[in-house]
Amino acid sequence: MAYQGKLAGGLTVTLSQDGAQTSVSVEQTGQRQSSSRTTGVWKTPPKLWQSGESAVVEIGSEEKIYLKISRGGVQSLSRTPDLNGAEAVRLTEVPDEAAGPRMEPMKPMEPMKPLKPMKPLNED
């Protein structure tokens, strides 16, 4: 299950979980930016607050993890943010498809083939 919230300014934030990965999609006027962070498995549903032009997501896994969302993208926070004056944003459950298409894990590349030795420059 994914969670979605609408921020002032027309941004829609969608949060979903795939194992220990949390995907964050930010959409405005049909343009979507997505990123993924390793957060661990959610123990509680995520929470979202808006403060000015940015927002903060709280992920409740083994320990609380905070992500800052702005028009520039998603950034991990190293400490608990000050949420005084921030407004809680209601998150509603939405189907996982609302978070956007899931990317398949990339397959490893084949090893490079050894290069042939070069001829000396003086020989023709």
Image (cartoon, grey):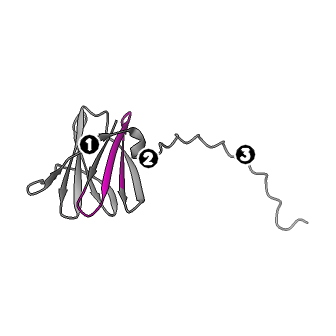
Comes first in the chain, label 1 or label 2: 1
Q: Given the image, on which type of amino acid does mark 3 rest?
A: Lys
Q: Is label 2 in a helix, a strand or a loop?
A: loop
Helix, strand or loop for the magenta stretch, by majority: strand
Residue placed under numbered mark 1 in the picture: 92
Residue range of the region highlighted in magenta in the rendering? 7-26
Pick whichever, 57 or 123, lies toward us.
57
For the residues labelled 1 and 3, the Cα–Cα distance comes to: 51 Å
Q: Residues within 10 Å of mark 2 (few under 14, many from 20)?
A: some
Mark 1 vs mark 2: give the one in front.
1
Judged left or right of residue 120, residue 36 is left
For the residues labelled 2 and 3, the Cα–Cα distance comes to: 37 Å
Pick whichever, 32 or 84, lies toward us.
32
Q: Is label 1 in a helix, a strand or a loop?
A: strand
Residue placed under numbered mark 2 in the picture: 100
Q: Which residue is drawn at 72% across and 45% down?
A: 113
Comes first in the chain, label 2 or label 3: 2
Q: Given the image, on which type of amino acid does mark 1 rest?
A: Thr
Q: Position of residue 35 (x, y in %)?
A: 39, 51
Judged left or right of residue 109, residue 114 is right
Q: Residue at x 14, y 54 (%)?
A: 87
Q: Which residue is drawn at 55% across and 42% down?
A: 106
| Mark seen at residue 113 | 3
